[in-house]
Image (tube, rainbow, N blue to C red):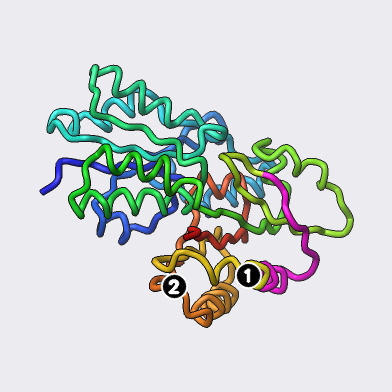
Amino acid sequence: MNNIKVIADSTCDLSKDLLERYDISIIPLCINMDDRSYKDGIDIAPEDIFAWSDKTGNTPKTAAPVLNDAIEFIKPYVEANKDIIFIGISEDMSSTCNVMRLAGEFYNYHKIYSINSKSLSTGIGFQVLKAATMAEEGYSVEEIVHYISDVMRDKVKASFIVDTLIYLARGGRCSTVTALIGNTLKLKPIIVVSEGKMSVGKKYRGSHKAVLLKYAKDLKEKLLSADTDRVFITHSGCEDEVVEELYDFLKGLNVFKEITVTRAGGVITSHCGPKTLGILYVTK
């Protein structure tokens, strides 16, 4: 039995069965709407966010966990004297990693390691699963932290196509998006996560389904030389038919041992809006 506890925040977008399979605990970020604060994935769902956004014309504000909540969250692991590895959303997007460091300082606990994933969504998820797998395999906490921070982190490739730019523009997390708003050509850009920041990549035109298939095909060469363990399709409510076509496309590449489909949680949904979809992978 190892003495390592792996924790992630709710933006990692890992499914319940993966979290249970690898004994990963999730601390929720906050989603603020109408002067009320909700805990991501606990007392609010993406559908609630879309309904509120459509009704008010606003986008929710998101925030790191409250320090007191983080202190309470890690308490049982501190009391059990576990090594705690926390992997959180990019520090360029949130102060969550720092909140977890401060929670460790509250206990004067030196066995908590807070890792900036420099990513979001299942880009974090890849790193979290690897840390949990290495812990199961008996690696030391130092070996795991080194591998995630110095070897794996920069190999994670996260990008996604947004169906509407409105949510990203309102959220202000991607400065280059604002310039595209109002474009009468109804562009659907790739949003690329690199070094912890989001930027606009190639711009597509066309129907939602056609654009997503083109995006997948444009990734083909990179996917063919990707790490073979897993690829993620993560989306915020795309039609089953579209997701199935992309799944079949990835399966047809005969590269990946696991093709995992996950639904984006409330925080990612708040910033990206409905019908966003990303194909996320790790390079060799």
Residue at the image point whose x is 40% and y is 49% from the top: 127
Of residue 221 and residue 92, the one placed in the foreground of this image is 221
Of residue 178 and residue 30, the one placed in the foreground of this image is 178
Span of residues in magenta? 199-216
Residue 137: quadrant of the picture? bottom left
Of residue 245 and residue 166, the one placed in the foreground of this image is 245
Secondary structure beneath dot 1 equals helix
Q: Is residue 67 found inside the magenta-colored segment of the image?
A: no
Give the percent coordinates (x, y) of residue 262. Answer: 45, 62
Please rate how many residues cluster around mark 2, counting C-alpha atoms within 10 Å: few if below 14, some from 14 to 19, many from 20: some
Q: Do residues under tags 2 and 1 come within 8 Å of each other at their CB atoms?
A: no
From the viewer's perspective, is 246 left or right of 177? left
Please rate how many residues cluster around mark 1, counting C-alpha atoms within 10 Å: few if below 14, some from 14 to 19, many from 20: some
Q: Is residue 200 found inside the magenta-colored segment of the image?
A: yes
Secondary structure beneath dot 2 equals loop
Give the percent coordinates (x, y) of residue 210. Answer: 72, 74
The answer to which of marks 2 and 1 sits earlier in the sequence is 1
Q: CA distance from mark 2 to mark 1?
A: 15 Å
Q: Is residue 32 visible?
A: no
Give the percent coordinates (x, y) of residue 284. Answer: 47, 60
Residue at the image point whose x is 24% and y is 39% from the top: 141
Give the percent coordinates (x, y) of residue 70. Answer: 33, 29
Q: Which residue is denoted by mark 1 in the rendering?
A: 216
Of residue 241 and residue 127, the one placed in the foreground of this image is 127
The number of numbered badges drawn on the structure is 2
Residue at the image point whose x is 50% and y is 46% from the top: 154
Q: Which residue is denoted by mark 2 in the rendering?
A: 256
Q: Is residue 176 above or below residue 280?
A: above
